[in-house]
Amino acid sequence: MEEKPSASIKPYLDKLTLGVTRILETSPGVAEVTFVEKEPAERHTIVSWEQKNSCTLPEDLKNFYLMTDGFQMTWSVKTDDAPMPLGSMVINSVSKLCRLGGSSMYTLPNAPTLADLEDDTDEEDFFLFSGNGDKPEKPHFDSRSLIFELDPCNGNGKVCLVYKHAKPVVSPDTEIWFLDRALYWHFLTKTFTAYYRLLITHLGLPQWQYAFTSYGVSPQAKQWFNMYKPITINTALLSEEADSFVNKLDPNKVFKSKNKTPVMKKKPPPQPAGSQKSHTSMTSSKTSLLPGNSSRK
């Protein structure tokens, strides 16, 4: 497909990108934004893929392919010599929506496959690694799951469309997972639509998928996040300082009612007669000593 500048994007394609092209073009330091226009996928191509893989594409992903057969947007930043490629947003076309785990990792005969990594302790190790037993069940490389590559992530891992339950028949329920370079699984979203929004809002920054892992993005990638997506990378900090954004004014103290309840004053207890006389004599003696109260003789 021929690469065309973002200004030539058709109106419906501009809506497809959620206006991210205009955001990038007005961002400081961005040199160029390139969008690869793709024709819609033929319906028979989708049907052929479903028959070949014995599963049905999710309705939202199928509608996406009927609009454009894949997605590719890249953008660069200005440097001294030449623009440096930075952001990359990719969704494979139907023809490149290939299955993982079935073929050998090497061309040698009897070479191991990803399915050979499966073990009875994998599930336990996953929960220990994630630190949270409430995480969803991870996908399997063997015949228990069907896994298809949506995004190669520039070699930093793979974003996959996962059918977790393939036996006895393939369940139509799918999820989007991230497989890192150490072959650990990380859950992203339940639907393709939700993942697509994540892809767009993270601007295709390098290693953005690692923000959803327990170890996060690399220090170098974090610098790019701080420059172009600071809120995304500092979400934990915002949650810790949530009280600083809360209005702590108490309206009951600010807007006090004018109709106050009268307060009943207690009368002092009666004093004995002797104490009253002594108190009266002390008061009169003090009054006689005040200036202007001297008596005539």
Image (tube, rainbow, N blue to C red):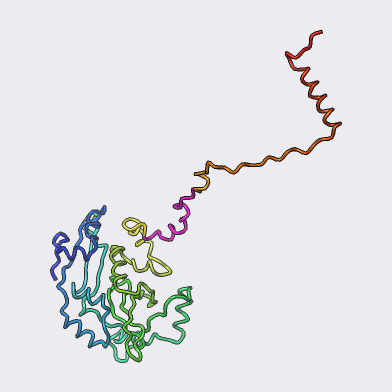
- The vertical placement of 261 against 221, above or below, is above
**What is the x, y in percent for residue 64?**
22, 73
Left/right placement of residue 15 relative to residue 231 reads: left
> How many marks on residues?
0
Q: Position of residue 226 (x, y in %)?
A: 35, 57
Q: Which of 113 and 212 is in front in this view?
A: 212
Residue lying furthest top = 297
Quadrant assignment for the C terminus: top right
Residue at 43% from the left image edge and 57% from the top image edge: 238
Q: Is residue 275 above or below residue 81?
A: above
Q: Is residue 239 left or right of residue 48?
A: right
Q: Is the magenta stretch mostly helix, strand or loop?
A: helix
In-front residue for pair 118/255: 255
From the top left corner, tell me how far across and down residue 258 is, in percent. 53, 41
Identify the residue shown where x is 45% and y is 87%: 120
For this view, does 165 lie left or right of residue 84? right
Q: Quadrant for residue 79, please give it.
A: bottom left
Which residue is at the front of the view, 161 or 44? 44
Q: Please determine whether, in this image, residue 176 is positioned above or below residue 272.
A: below
**Residue drawn at (46%, 50%) of the image:** 247
Asked if the magenta segment contains residue 247, the reply would be yes
Q: Position of residue 42 (x, y in %)?
A: 15, 79
Quarter of the picture containing the N terminus is: bottom left
Q: Give the range drawn in magenta.
A: 232-249
**Is residue 289 part of the magenta span, yes or no?**
no
